[in-house]
Image: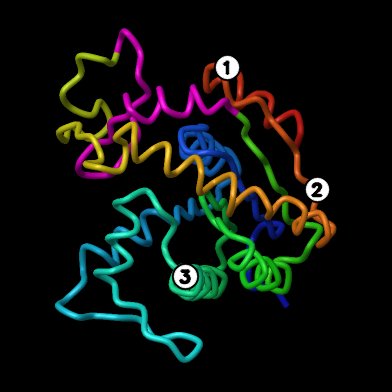
Amino acid sequence: MSKVKNQKPKVIIIMGPPGAGKGTQAELLAEKFNLYYFETSKVLEENFNQKKKNSFIETEGKKYFIKEEEKLWKEGKLCSPPFVTFLVKEKIKKLWEEGKNLILSGSPRTLYEGKKIIPLIKKLYGRKNIQVILLEISPQETIFRNSHRRICKLMRHPILYSKETEKLKTCPLDGSRLIKREGLDDPETIKVRIKEYKERTLPLINYLKSEKLEVKKINGSPPPAIVFENILKTI
C-alpha cells in the first residue's frame, strides 16, 4: 500500500539531452503539483562533496570509489550505473516512506538503471500514476545552452541565458554568486555528454514502452513558459 498521504500518488519522469530544460520544467511541475523535485545530479554532488579519502559504496558485490565516480562525472561521462542506481533507489524509498510524490530529472540515465529503478517506482506508486516526458532539442542547441549555462552557488538554480541575464553576477532568487560548472559545461565535455546520451540513455525509451509506460515527446526548443504549457496539455 502506498504511503503517499493526502493526495493521489504521482510520479513524473523528465528525460532529454543535456540542456533540454529538464531542471527548469521539473521545478515548475514540482510547484504546480506539489511534488518533491528529485534531481540525480544533486544526489551525486552531495556524495562527491562529502567524500572522504578512499570512500566507496559497495553494491552487488563490488566497491565503487567515490573519487573515481566523480572523475567520470567531471569528464562528461556517466557514472557507473550500479553506483548511481544504489543512491537513487535508497533516496526514492526514503521519500516514499515520507509520503512524498516525485518528479525525477536526469534519472534513470541508462538501461541498467531503468531496469532497476522503474520496477521499484511501479511497485511503490503504481504504473498508472507514472508519466514520462521526453524533451527534444538539437545537438547544436545542447552545446549552445550548456556552454552559456550558469548556476547559483548556493541553491544550484540554473539561470537561463538571454540578453537580460548575460551580465547578471548574482542569483535573483537567493543572491549567491553565479558560477559555471567547471569542466562539465565546456564544449568538448558537452560533446561527450551528447554521445553518452545517444548511446546509453535513448535506449531506455523502448524499455519504458515495454513496461507499458507512455513516453510523451515535447519540443524543448521554445521558451520555458511555452514548453511548460505544452507539457501541461499532455499530462
Labels 1, 3: front one: 1
**119 or 6: which is nearer to us?**
119
**Quadrant location of the C terminus?**
top right
Q: Earlier in the sequence, mark 2 or mark 1?
A: 2
Q: Residue furthest bottom?
A: 61
In the displayed structure, 148 sits above or below 200; it is above
The 10 Å Cα crowd at callout 2, few under 14, some 14 to 19, many 20 or more, is: some
| Label 3: element kind | helix
Give the amino acid type for the residue marked by disc 2 in the picture.
Glu
Read off the residue under disc 2.
214
Q: Earlier in the sequence, mark 1 or mark 3?
A: 3
| Label 2: element kind | loop
Q: Which mark is residue 235?
A: none
Read off the residue under disc 3.
91
Residue at 41%, 62% in the rendered image: 79
Give the amino acid type for the residue marked by disc 3 in the picture.
Lys
Which region shows up in magenta? 137-164
Image location (x, y in percent) of residue 29: 57, 39
Residue 154 on the magenta segment: yes
Image location (x, y in percent) of residue 41: 39, 54
Residue 60 on the magenta segment: no
Read off the residue under disc 1.
222
Q: Earlier in the sequence, mark 2 or mark 3?
A: 3
In the displayed structure, 6 sits above or below 201; it is below
Residue at 68%, 30% in the rendered image: 218
Q: CA distance from mark 2 to mark 3?
A: 24 Å
Mark 2–mark 1 CB contact (< 8 Å): no
Give the amino acid type for the residue marked by disc 1 in the picture.
Pro
Residue at 55%, 53% in the rendered image: 104
Q: Quadrant of residue 198?
A: top right
Image location (x, y in percent) of residue 81: 50, 68
- How many dots with numbers? 3
